[in-house]
Image (cartoon, helix red, strand yellow):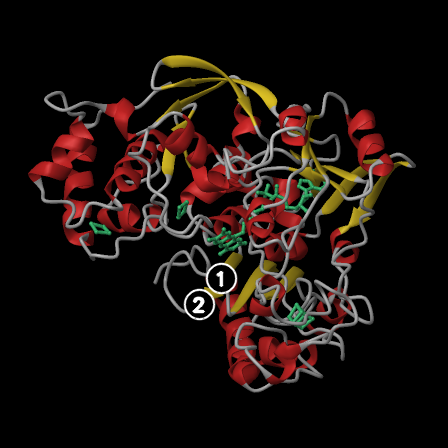
Amino acid sequence: MTGQQALGETADLAVTTEMTVNGRSHTLQVEPWTSLLDLLREGLQLTGSKKGCDHGQCGACTVLVNGVRVNSCLCLAVMHDGDEVTTIEGLGSEGNLSPMQQSFVDHDGYQCGYCTPGQICSAVGMLKEGHAKTEADIREQLSGNVCRCGAYPNIVAAVKHVMSMGQTEGGR
Amino acid sequence: MNNFQYVRAEGLDGAARFVAGHAGAKFIGGGTNLVDLMKYNVEKPSALVDLNRLSMHDVSELPDGGLRIGASVTNSDVAYHPTVSTHYPLLSRAILAGASAQLRNKATTGGNLLQRTRCVYFYDTATPCNKREPGTGCPAKEGINRTLAILGTSVSCIATHPSDMCVALAALGAVVQVTGPGGSRSIRFEEFHRLPGNHPEIDTTLAADEIITSVDLPKTGFAGHSAYIKVRDRQSYAFALVSVAAGLEVTDGVIAEAGVALGGVAHKPWRNSQLEQELLIGKPANRDTYHEFQRALLVGAQGYGENDFKLKLAPVTVVRALEQAAHEGEQA
Ligand SMILES: Cc1cc2nc3c(=O)[nH]c(=O)nc-3n(C[C@H](O)[C@H](O)[C@H](O)COP(=O)(O)OP(=O)(O)OC[C@H]3O[C@@H](n4cnc5c(N)ncnc54)[C@H](O)[C@@H]3O)c2cc1C
Ligand code: SF4
Ligand code: FES
Ligand code: FES
């Protein structure tokens, strides 16, 4: 998508879009057909968010927009002017992991790791929403994140642990 | 995805006039259906008018005791709104039975009503499909139709409307408020979606340049006796094979008010309020009543092969939903 279009006409269609990503503000010229996921991965080199299906079916692209979890593959980047985006890179860093990231490590909440950034962002978003109370709730409310490796039991354990600590993280 | 112009709507009038004046222009809400279809080249808009900056984000009480849900309110915000979960639990349950949390956080009330069918041929531009390209044919009738309709079908199309939320809105008797270059009007929910007939490319009675501004709920929300049953291939994050939204008001064992709609069986949520008047209201709230109603409601149902199982599934789901609604709140 980005970068593959002929210049000329497409340059006229680009829209100025201001966005804060992981605390850094950007002013970007964005072609309307660029998804938020492609902007993050290809425009800003934030490759933590993954493209599993590109159709809203797997959750690997989950990020937080103004603290709310969404599938970035179905978001048009131009529709997020003025928004605050938090990706897996913004939650914590090597040596300074966020509670959810640390809990996934401690509970072995992944195998290949492809779905993990989406799982973690989704779990962080779920705790902020505050509607999950039980393990069954966690399973239901994380059903938008598919794990091809089937690491589900450990993912649930990791999320349950952070839930029991009663704190939230991840942007406003 | 094709190239297109992006416009941030500043006012309702301007947005409607822009779409009226530009061939191929469309509105966009959450984008969870439209962007998906654009990636398959099923939708190829020349321009998208973003409605999210208009003030359609509120849920507010109406003077008649009903509730107005702004078109831009997300599916999540509707489902968890305290008034909705208390007075219209049927709506909350139906919404939360659909899609995933991430999608519900993005999807809007207006967009949910206008989501397109999930018929696999509609999505696949390499195949014919009367809904996508009128006149090319309908391979689903003899092909992959496990999820498709058994009621109200036509020679042209047997697609289903995939929304869960709309099934509850039909049972509740919602009203859709719309505005366009020709003015504003109200559309009763039963008249909002249409049957395919000879024009399966047209899903609703809304004009292309009309904007949904809100969905209004009546005062009666079946708060005490309602149920949403969704039968699907997996327990979460799957579209309905058959779903039933049932709401009752029961006084001394007799049905005083009723609203029953089915999803997954037709081109629109399937409701027949005349049959509710004749066969539910004033009748005892029991199995015999529900069976008689179910038989009348599903008259004319027809399978197309893969979806024949719905002919058995729909009747039992109607009865189960009515029983569950009637017994809601009772001690087990
Ligand atoms: C993987 C997946 C699983 C899903 N599972 C389910 C499920 O189980 N149950 C279910 O019910 N749904 C399900 N959905 C569908 C989801 O509910 C819809 O995509 C969503 O409700 C559409 O809302 P939106 O705001 O994103 O619409 P958009 O994609 O923005 O728009 C849809 C259509 O509505 C038009 N539009 C939007 N707003 C307005 C307005 N205010 N006035 C006039 N026109 C407007 C647009 O032009 C477009 O044609 C699923 C979707 C995905 C991707
Ligand atoms: S059922 Fe309707 S949507 Fe599906 S192939 Fe036939 S015409 Fe197209
Ligand atoms: S890549 Fe977005 S949901 Fe799969
Ligand atoms: S860890 Fe491999 S997909 Fe989830």
Judging from the image, mark 2 belongs to the subunit labelled B
The residue positioned 74% from the left and 30% from the top of the image is B63
| Residue B199 placement (x, y as % from top left) | 81, 66
Q: Report the residue marked by disc 1.
A: B239
Q: Which mark is residue B232?
A: 2
| Residue A11 placement (x, y as % from top left) | 63, 25
Farthest left residue? A106
Q: Secondary structure at mark 2?
A: loop
Task: Using the image as rendered, state which of residue A148 and residue A45 is in the foreground.
Answer: A45
Does any atom of ligand 1 lie closer than 8 Å to the CB of label 2?
A: yes
Task: Using the image as rendered, state which of residue B59 and residue A101 is in the foreground.
Answer: A101
Task: Using the image as rendered, state which of residue B60 and residue B201 is in the foreground.
Answer: B201
Relative horizontal placement of residue B113, taking residue A58 as reference (left or right)? right
The residue positioned 56% from the left and 79% from the top of the image is B315
Q: CA distance from mark 2 to mark 1?
A: 6 Å
Relative horizontal placement of residue B54, taking residue B164 as reference (left or right)? right
Q: Are marks 2 and 1 in contact (CB under 8 Å)?
A: yes
Relative horizontal placement of residue A158, taking residue B275 as reference (left or right)? left
Q: Secondary structure at mark 1?
A: loop
Does any atom of ligand 1 lie closer than 8 Å to the CB of label 1?
A: yes
Q: Which mark is residue B101?
A: none
Q: Is residue A60 above or below residue B286?
A: above
Q: Are marks 2 and 1 on the same chain?
A: yes
Relative horizontal placement of residue A146, taking residue B330 as reference (left or right)? left
Q: Amino acid at mark 1?
A: Phe
Corner quadrant of residue B25: top right
